[in-house]
Amino acid sequence: LHRGHQALIAAVNASRDRLGLAEAAVFTFMQHPRTVLDDHPAPFLLTTWREKLSVLRELGVGVIVAADFCPELSRLGYREFVEKFLVGYLGMKHLIAGYDVHLGASRRGNAATLEALGSELGYSMEVHQPVRHGETIISSSAIRAAVSAGDMPTAEAMLGRPYEVWGEVTPG
């Protein structure tokens, strides 16, 4: 949950208040989609689930849906995903997405297709522009690169908090 995600959640909360909606909701996946889609190992996660849930609550998210990304879900088209999960399950009335949003099978759901679908399914949509650290667009990949290079000040600046590693300390 880096500063780009934090900006999206702030926009969600502002829209919730402006539109008089009941809750801010986040739909996420328990594991990185690459664990299902690629033969290559998924990139290391920047945040543990415990930390992620804590940060989301601190940011004012009232509903957190963490789905298991599985082969069946990976084959679901963006329309079916939005209809079933976002509109059907969550009752979504307004969608805020990042500038690079892609969802559904083959990543065919993008800002334009999701906005067109919104007029049909009864939700409005905003596209949030990227957040930058200097000239770099803040992303999990950019933060992973900083951590891998040992550039912890840059990782911290993009995360908006110090990078942490969780684990159990044992003898030996």
Image: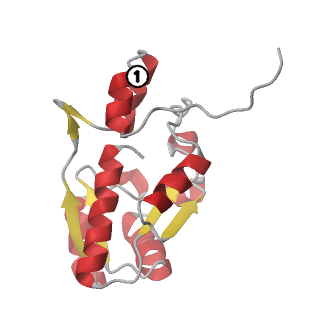
Q: Amino acid at mark 1?
A: Met
Q: Secondary structure at mark 1?
A: helix
Q: Quadrant of the C terminus?
A: top right
Left or right of 42, for residue 118 = left
Q: Position of residue 115 (x, y in %)?
A: 22, 70
Residue located at (83% from left, 19% from top): 171
Q: Position of residue 128 (x, y in %)?
A: 21, 57
Number of other residues with Cα within 10 Å of mark 1, as a class: few under 14, some 14 to 19, many 20 or more: some
Q: Say how the picture is coloured.
A: secondary structure
Left or right of 24, for residue 4 = left
Rendered view: 19 above or below 54: below
Residue located at (30% from left, 57% from top): 8
Image quadrant assignment for residue 118: bottom left
Rendered view: 91 above or below 39: below
Residue located at (37% from left, 43% from top): 2
From the image, tell me which residue sits under label 1: 152
Residue located at (51% from left, 46% from top): 33
> Camera-side residue: 152 or 149?
152
Q: Position of residue 105 (x, y in %)?
A: 42, 56
